[in-house]
Amino acid sequence: MKKVAVLLAEGFEEIEALTVVDVLRRAKITCDMVSIKNQTVYGAHSIEVKADKIIDENLNKYDMVVLPGGLPGAENLAKDERVLEVLRNFSNDKTKYIGAICASPAIVLSKAEIEKGKFITSYPDSEYEQMLEKANYVDELVVVDNNLITSRGPATTMLFAYKLVDVLDGDSKKLKEGMLWNKLEEEE
């Protein structure tokens, strides 16, 4: 069974973290909320979350790490050398995946220096686009480049989470139907 670690740092974007955890767990994918510091972590909007685990060397046993955005959450992830090392390891291992959304593709992936030549999207901000100048910046809601999956921000989180399911499990169609996503698609 595939295992995912959603990394939490103080100031994480709650929608991006908790929606991903919810969708992956509904898909029967093991998903742990892993804090980089304390068991209790506060999001960018002061929502208190109790992490399942604290970061340690076992992070390499996961199949995917997910980086929520949010400020200062993404900045706090980028300051943690353990996070950057895991990202470098996962980036070089084509059997492992990295998911990053909102500010994290720009702030964290560029700090780990794994963005070069990759097709990436992020929160639409000129400062973030500059941080990704070595990448191939794409103006799309969700972008997959081999083992790297990126997305724009809070409103794109469901699309991002479904794409993570597709990458790990192969098919989110039944899950989308059960969560009525297909009804939203019919409205378009």
Image (cartoon, rainbow, N blue to C red):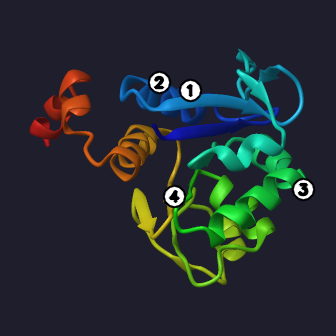
Which of disc 4 and disc 2 is earlier in sequence?
2
The residue at 55%/31% (across/down) is 31
Q: Quadrant of residue 105?
A: bottom right
12, above or below 128, in the image: above
**Where's the N terminus, which quadrant?**
top left
Q: Quadrant of residue 135?
A: bottom right
Which of disc 1 and disc 4 is earlier in sequence?
1
Where is residue 13? Give x, y as percent.
65, 35
Q: CA distance from mark 2 to mark 3?
A: 27 Å
147, above or below 100, in the image: below
Assess whether mark 2 and mark 1 are in contact (beta carbons under 8 angstroms): yes
Q: CA distance from mark 3 to mark 4?
A: 21 Å
Which of disc 3 and disc 2 is earlier in sequence?
2
Please indicate, yes or no, whether residue 128 appears anywhere in the rendered image.
yes
**Where's the C terminus, which quadrant?**
top left
Specify the amino acid type for callout 1.
Leu
**Label 4: element kind:** strand
Disc number lying in front (3 or 4): 3
**Residue at the spot of label 1:** 18
Disc number lying in front (2 or 4): 2
The residue at 76%/25% (across/down) is 53
Task: Name the side, left or right, on which 180 lies relative to 119.
Answer: left
Specify the amino acid type for callout 4.
Thr
Label placed on residue 81: 3
**Residue at the spot of label 2:** 22
The residue at 63%/38% (across/down) is 5
**Residue at the spot of label 4:** 150
150, above or below 146, in the image: above
Specify the amino acid type for callout 2.
Asp
Which one is in front, 81 or 1? Answer: 1
